[in-house]
Amino acid sequence: MLLLKKIVPYLKQVMTTKVDIDRRFEKQHKLGQGSMSEVWRARDRKSGRTIALKVLDYEKTRRLEARFAGLKRPTEGSVAITLRHPNIVRTLEHGLTTHGEQYLVMELIKGSSLPLLIDLQNDVMLANRLKFTIQIGEGLDYFHKQGWIHRDLCPRNVLVDKQHQIKLIDFGLVVPNTPEFRVPGNRTGTASYMAPELVKRQPTDQRIDIYSYSVSCYEMFAKRLPYNVDPTLTLDMVVQHINSPPTDIREVVPDIDDHIAATIMKGLSPDPNQRYSNVSEMVNQFKKAQERLEEEYEYYDEDEKTTDDEYEYVYDDDEGGEAEDDEYEYEYEEYDEDDT
Ligand SMILES: Nc1ncnc2c1ncn2[C@@H]1O[C@H](COP(=O)(O)OP(=O)(O)OP(=O)(O)O)[C@@H](O)[C@H]1O
Ligand SMILES: [Mg+2]
């Protein structure tokens, strides 16, 4: 029986058919060059569909896996394939290439990357950032409820599709939310989004993702990180700054809604016990703020209609509309050049 238990996973691995990527897929162009992989827009000759193909770098994956030696860390593909949420990219297939690299076949997200929108702070961003905040939180909440810790949530790993819906991508550093993976030690992740307890090599849990989520929310509203430091930080530099508290977002964005500001700042508490204990609590605060703001907006709108300024106001808005359309086109060029 014991022998069988040991042999079955081995057999599964050996029996997995390896895929000749270049025969199976017609690569069209590179969508992204991640730190661990290459992602291609490609046509799947088998299904005829246009998809996103992620091929993990063999050597870098091996090195990452070595950091979790002795622990059964699931592969990115085996985690991604189980996820079904409107704000998480859908993975259609995963496996090994004939060269032994892991690959994932995903739905192709046409749209924009979140860092670009943070940088532009254009109409799309201004009109949607609270919705984006909520949708990232909903994707993360679902993810946590499936029993995982993300460990690399940051704007770089968030896409916004053409309908302005959030899609979380990249589950390359995910670990199960189990005691053996919560012990101190491994500091994989992106330096500027790492929770202090992770940087300080203390025990970690899903609240490290709440911290990274809060840094990402901060950036969406403030266009900068919560610390007065260079954003291209190395981990060693973060260690030096980790003891200084984050700058209150109200100082950076004076007109931010107070409830939204307080929610983000609580998520950024250096002490995990002072943060929200789970993502849904935090998202509920954003949703309450959204409901209130919508009510206030409707009220304000009613008021507007009764004033003489209305004509002026509508006229201005029309001009803004044209500018927005141009930006919209421009914004997606980077991402999906040959989309017609
Ligand atoms: N499903 C998708 N549809 C469209 N583009 C995608 C998709 N998945 C990934 N990309 C593009 O490829 C880039 C790299 O993907 P991903 O973040 O998964 O790779 P990575 O090597 O794990 O990255 P890193 O470790 O640098 O965060 C993304 O930033 C995005 O631009
Ligand atoms: Mg990534």
Image (cartoon, helix red, strand yellow):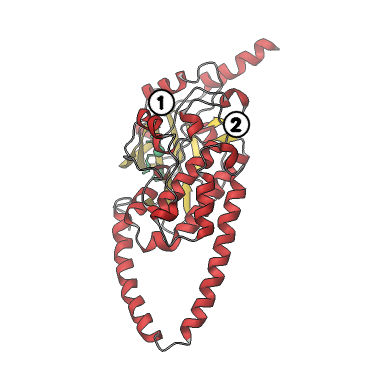
Question: Does 274 sit left or right of 189 as displayed?
Answer: right
Question: Does 290 sit left or right of 330 as displayed?
Answer: right
Question: For the residue carrying disc 2, how many other residues have a C-alpha within 10 Å: few (<14), some (14-19), or many (20+)?
Answer: some
Question: Does 295 sit left or right of 339 as displayed?
Answer: right
Q: Are marks 2 and 1 in contact (CB under 8 Å)?
A: no
Q: Is residue 254 above or below residue 139?
A: below
Q: Quadrant holding ligand 1? A: top left
Location of the N terminus by quadrant is top right
Q: Residue at x 47, y 52 (%)?
A: 166
Q: Position of residue 312 (x, y in %)?
A: 35, 84
Q: Nearer the viewer, residue 184 or 94?
A: 184
Q: Report which residue position mark 2 lands on.
A: 177
Q: Report which residue position mark 1 lands on.
A: 101
Mark found first going from the N terminus, 2 or 1: 1
Q: Is residue 38 above or below residue 142?
A: above
Q: Which residue is situated farthest in the bottom direction here?
A: 308
Q: Residue at x 28, y 59 (%)?
A: 330
Question: For the residue carrying disc 1, how many other residues have a C-alpha within 10 Å: few (<14), some (14-19), or many (20+)?
Answer: some
Q: Amino acid at mark 1?
A: Glu
Q: Position of residue 47 (x, y in %)?
A: 45, 43
Q: Is residue 287 above or below residue 314?
A: above
Q: Residue at x 45, y 60 (%)?
A: 256
Q: Quadrant of residue 288?
A: bottom right
Q: Amino acid at mark 2?
A: Asn
Q: Is residue 150 above or below residue 11?
A: below
- Measured in 3D between alpha carbons, the distance from the residue under mark 2 to the one under mark 1, in whole angstroms, is 26 Å
Location of the C terminus by quadrant is bottom left
At numbered mark 1, what does the secondary structure look like: helix, strand or loop?
A: loop
Label 2 vs label 1, nearer the camera: 2
Q: Position of residue 74 (x, y in %)?
A: 54, 27
